[in-house]
Image (spheres, rainbow, N blue to C red):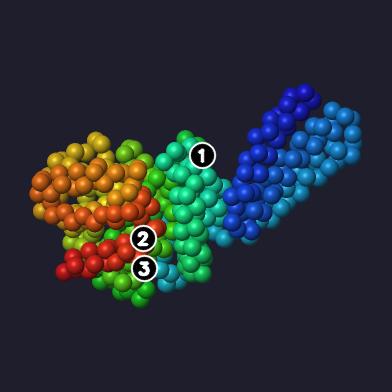
């Protein structure tokens, strides 16, 4: 019995504070409900331990009731969560290039609404990262809320599911290389005819649906398909990263005709590390590459990268006030690519920080639309 009490007390000491913090971060009823059930399952064992110590049957009964109430409510909420299911003719699909994986419906990364997970991540980043100050946290939270409010009105996006389960798998040291990718097509496009395609590599934190929502605007205006492979937390320097990119492109070819001369590769933030691996092994050729607030891959020099893509075009977009990826760092690499023989176009958003994709969403959309349209055959 001593060991049972110790385990129950330890569980409560860990779960209760986390659930309380989580409750303050939630912005959806489902997120608040799930955190409430977890809090109940944490408080219950604590009450039971106190009741056992005091030999109070009433407190032990209350403790057991809280646990059962939490479990029942948790199961009820879990059953109302939709599986990843695209409608016939849906613009966006969740796919797996390896074939053997299935969507993890009951993982915490899918049970907890993605916007709530992002807010938890923002809080964690603020506490651990000195570069994310309170004002940036407020701005980023507000911008993200607006995007998810918009995509929440779109049935296709509501049903596609989240890619964040594979972020959690990497955090917990589990296998995260699932072959998952998002596949977005312009509405009404003829899938049997070659379609120009943008391959998007997400940044650190995971493959957020918010990115796909912003890129859906670009897709509709340009006629481009979008393929967005998921790679855990976005550590594209890890083994298997470029293989995941190639596998997603190859698999997407089963659902659309891809124009082999019209594939473009784009990386956001940490996704820039993945872009630097372009054509490092045999596979698809890219007409152009796009770096957005990008981090360069230290293992790939600009000379090496330019040699592989010599004569090709590169678009570099970043914030001039980015304290994570300073403009001097970005422009220096871009100039080295230009010297190496690439046609480089740079756009500095002078007053903006690392979150220019959200902060200047309309201007970035215009830049991407102009870039992609100008490269249509």
Coordinates of residue 45 in the picture (x, y in percent): 76, 36
- What residue is pinned by disc 2? 360
Residue 143 in sight here:
yes
Q: Earlier in the sequence, mark 3 or mark 2?
A: 3
Quadrant of image for the C terminus = bottom left
Q: Tell me the CA gap for discs 3 and 2.
A: 14 Å
Q: CA distance from mark 1 to mark 3?
A: 33 Å
| Residue nearest the viewer, comparing 189 with 216 | 216
The residue at 48%/42% (across/down) is 125
Up the image or down, 168 lies above or below 215; here it is: above
Residue at disc 2, secondary structure: loop
Do the numbered discs 1 and 3 sit on residues whose CB atoms are within 8 Å?
Answer: no
In 3D space, how far apart are the residues under numbered discs 1 and 2 (Cα atoms)? Answer: 25 Å
Badge 1: residue crowd in 10 Å (few <14, some 14–19, many ≥20): few
SS for callout 3: helix
Residue designated by label 3: 217
Asked if the residues shown at circle 1 and circle 2 are in contact, with their CB atoms under 8 angstroms apart, the answer is: no
Viewer-closest of 249 and 151: 151
In the rendered structure, the answer to whether residue 58 lies left or right of residue 286 reads right
The quarter of the picture where residue 63 lies is top right
Q: Earlier in the sequence, mark 1 or mark 2?
A: 1
For the residue carrying disc 3, how many other residues have a C-alpha within 10 Å: few (<14), some (14-19), or many (20+)?
Answer: some
Kindly identify which residue carries mark 1. 127
Q: With 365 as the anchor, is 90 left or right in this view?
A: right
Quadrant for the N terminus in the image = top right
Which residue extends farthest top? 2
Comes first in the chain, label 1 or label 3: 1
Label 2: few (<14), some or many (≥20) within 10 Å? few
What residue is drawn where x is 80% and y is 37%?
47
């Amino acid at each position: 019995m001593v060991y049972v009490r110790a385990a129950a007390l330890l569980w409560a000491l860990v779960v209760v504070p986390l659930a309380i913090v989580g409750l303050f971060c939630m912005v959806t009823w489902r997120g608040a409900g799930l955190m409430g059930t977890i809090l109940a399952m944490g408080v219950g064992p604590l009450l039971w331990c106190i009741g056992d110590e005091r030999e109070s049957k009433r407190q032990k009964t209350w403790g057991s009731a809280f646990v059962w109430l939490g479990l029942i409510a948790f199961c009820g909420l879990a059953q109302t969560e939709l599986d990843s299911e695209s409608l016939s003719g849906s613009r966006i699909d969740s796919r797996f290039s390896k074939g053997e994986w299935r969507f993890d419906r009951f993982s915490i990364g899918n049970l907890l609404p993605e916007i709530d997970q992002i807010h938890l991540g923002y809080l964690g980043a603020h506490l651990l990262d000195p570069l994310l100050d309170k004002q940036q946290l407020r701005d980023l939270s507000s911008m993200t809320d607006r995007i998810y409010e918009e995509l929440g009105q779109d049935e296709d996006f509501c049903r596609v599911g989240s890619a964040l389960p594979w972020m959690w798998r990497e955090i917990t040291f589990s296998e995260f290389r699932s072959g998952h990718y998002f596949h977005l097509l312009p509405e009404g496009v003829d899938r049997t005819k070659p379609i120009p395609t943008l391959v998007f590599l997400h940044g650190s934190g995971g493959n957020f649906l918010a990115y796909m929502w912003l890129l859906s605007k670009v897709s509709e205006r340009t006629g481009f398909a979008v393929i967005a492979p998921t790679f855990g937390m976005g550590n594209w320097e890890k083994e298997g990263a470029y293989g995941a990119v190639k596998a997603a492109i190859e698999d997407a070819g089963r659902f659309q005709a891809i124009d082999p001369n019209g594939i473009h590769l784009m990386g956001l933030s940490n996704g820039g590390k993945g872009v630097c691996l372009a054509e490092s092994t045999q596979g698809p050729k890219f007409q152009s590459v796009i770096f957005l607030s990008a981090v360069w891959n230290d293992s790939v020099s600009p000379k090496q990268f330019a040699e592989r893509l010599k004569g090709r075009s590169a678009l570099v977009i970043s914030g001039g006030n980015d304290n994570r990826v300073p403009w001097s760092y970005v422009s220096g690499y871009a100039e080295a690519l230009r010297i190496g023989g690439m046609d480089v176009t740079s756009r500095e958003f002078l007053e903006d920080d690392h979150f220019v994709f959200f902060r200047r969403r309309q201007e970035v959309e215009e830049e991407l639309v102009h870039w992609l349209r100008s490269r249509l055959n």
